[in-house]
Image: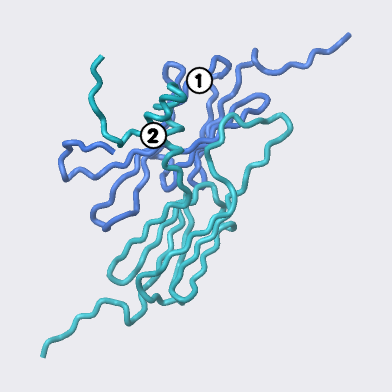
Chain colours: A cyan, B blue
Amino acid sequence: MVVRFQPLANIFDEIDSIFNPQAVSYPAIQWMNRRRFADISVKESGEQVHVYAELPGVAKEDVAVNINDGTLVISADRKQPELKENEQWIRNEVSYGKIERTIQLPYSVDLEKVTATHEQGILHIVLPKHENAKPKQISIR
Amino acid sequence: MTMTNEPLEKRPVHSMIPAVDIVETANSYIVKLDIPGSVKEKIKASIENSTLVISAEALEYTGVEKSESVKQYRREFLLAKDIEVNTVDAQYDLGVLTVVLNKKQQFLPKQISIN
C-alpha cells in the first residue's frame, strides 16, 4: 500500500491512531483539542472600543465587569448543574466553575459611560474612548 | 482549516463543533449544546434516519465591522432505539440549546406491585 507522505501537521492524530484507532475522527476529540472558554474579541471603532466575551450558560447575575487602571477584568461563574438522585452524566464537555479574563485596554476610556449587556451567552461591553484618545481632525492653517 | 477556492466576496465561515453535555434521567436524555450569540430562528434541529442533527449560525465579532464573519455550528448524534422521536422538545436560552429526548414508554423503569 502506498501512503502519501504527510508532514508533522497530523502528528497528534498519528499518535492517537496508534493507541486508539477509533478515536481519531471523533468530533469530541477534535473539539477537545481546541477547547476554550470565554473567547474574547476586541473591536475598535472611531469613538468606541467593543469587547465581546462568549459566556454561554452564565446567568447575568454571575457576571462581573471591573475596570481598574486601564485593565478590564471580566469574571464569570458558570454553575455546575446539580444532578438529582436518578440522573447521571452521559457526556460532559462543558467546563464549569469560575473564570476570569483580563484585558489591557488599548485606549483610555470614559469610565462614566461604559455600558455592558449580556444576551444569549454574549457579554458585550461598550467602552467610549476618553476625549484625548478620540481621533482628531487638525485644521491646517 | 483547509483552503478553498470560494469567491472573496463571500463572508468567511468558521465551522465550530459545539460542546455538549448529556444527562440521562429516568425518562429522558437532556442534551445541552453551547451555541453563544445565535437566535432561535438561526438554529435548526432535525431527526433523520435516527440521527439528531443540530446546526446553527452565530455572528463572529472579530475584525472590522464591514467584514463580519459567521460561525457555523453543527453536530450530529446517532440516537439509540429507546428514544421517542415524536416528542422531542428544544429550547434556546443564555446561548445554550437544550434538547429533551424522551424515552419510549416500553423502556421506562417500572415499579411492579407485589400482590
Q: CA distance from mark 1 to mark 2?
A: 29 Å
**Left or right: A89 in relation to A111:** right
Give the mark count: 2
> Considering only vertical position in the picture, is B66 above or below A14?
below
Outermost residue, bottom side: A141
- Give residue A2's mark: none
Is disc 2 on the same chain as disc 1?
A: no
Q: Residue at x 10, y 91 (%)?
A: A141
Outermost residue, left side: A141
Badge 1 amino acid: Leu
On the image, numbered disc 2 is attached to which residue?
A: A12
Counting from the top left corner in percent of width and height, residue A99 is at 54, 55
Host chain of mark 1 = B
Q: Residue at x 54, y 47 (%)?
A: A57
Q: Disc 1 on helix, strand or loop? A: loop
Which mark is in front, 1 or 2?
2
On the image, numbered disc 1 is attached to which residue?
A: B79
Q: Mark 1 packing: few (<14 Cα in 10 Å), some, or many (20+)?
A: some
Host chain of mark 2 = A
Badge 2 amino acid: Phe
Counting from the top left corner in percent of width and height, residue A136 is at 23, 80
Counting from the top left corner in percent of width and height, residue A20 is at 46, 24
